[in-house]
């Protein structure tokens, strides 16, 4: 059971590294997380294959269950961080790109979209 526990541990560690990178989401941190996520997926694939022939009464089964529980927690955390980063970056892109219906949102201090403000490129105007 020891090799299986080690595969689960390696997958959990790869997810932890990804989570640490995604605390400050940048294009670079997301790109550098790809290899760790691939490692986690590969480990899980091998682990699944290995466990098909194992007996659940094996003494190491409880340790494996604990590692898998840790993986689940890390995976939930990574999913939440990725979703948050995606929403943030999509919103940021909408604010930076001004095209038709996807024009600047002109957020008010209350966090709601306000009426568009005409922009004169010859002047600098600050509202709020």
Image (tube, rainbow, N blue to C red):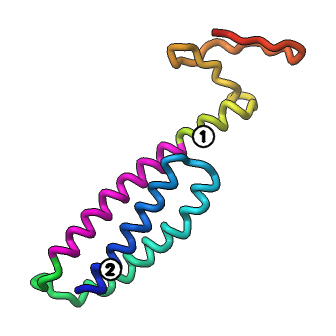
Is 60 colored magenta in this rendering? no
Q: Is residue 60 left or right of residue 72?
A: left
The N terminus lies in which quarter of the figure? Answer: bottom left
Element carrying mark 1: helix
Quarter occupied by residue 10: bottom left
Residue at image location 64% in from the left, 23% down from the top: 105
Answer above or below: position of 76 versus 4. above
Give the main secondary structure, helix, strand or loop, of the magenta stretch: helix
Q: Where is residue 25 drawn, in percent x and y?
A: 55, 48
Q: Quadrant of the C terminus?
A: top right
Q: How many marks?
A: 2
Q: Is residue 106 above or below residue 15?
A: above
Image coordinates of residue 5 in percent, x first then y, are 28, 79
Q: Position of residue 13 (x, y in %)?
A: 39, 67
Q: Which of 39 and 115 is in front in this view?
A: 39
**Highlighted magenta segment, given as a residue range:** 62-86
Residue that badge 1 annotates:
90
* Residue 59 falls left or right of residue 32: left
Q: Where is residue 63 in the image (x, y as percent from the top left)?
A: 19, 74
The residue sitting at 55% across, 14% down in the picture is: 109
Q: Distance between the residues labelled 2 and 1?
A: 37 Å
Outermost residue toward the bottom in this view: 53
Depicted 53 relative to depicted 72: above or below: below
Residue underneath mark 2:
6
65 part of magenta stretch: yes
């Amino acid at each position: 059971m020891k090799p299986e526990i080690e595969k689960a541990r390696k997958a959990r560690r790869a997810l932890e590294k990804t989570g640490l990178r995604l605390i400050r989401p940048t294009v670079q941190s997301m790109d550098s997380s790809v290899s760790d996520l691939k490692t986690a997926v590969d480990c899980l694939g091998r682990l699944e294959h290995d466990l098909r022939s194992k007996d659940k009464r094996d003494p190491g089964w409880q340790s494996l269950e604990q590692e898998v529980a840790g993986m689940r927690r890390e995976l939930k955390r990574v999913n939440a961080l990725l979703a948050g980063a995606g929403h943030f970056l999509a919103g940021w892109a909408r604010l930076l790109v001004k095209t038709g219906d996807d024009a600047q949102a002109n957020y008010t201090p209350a966090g709601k979209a306000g009426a568009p403000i005409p922009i004169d490129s010859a002047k600098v105007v600050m509202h709020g």
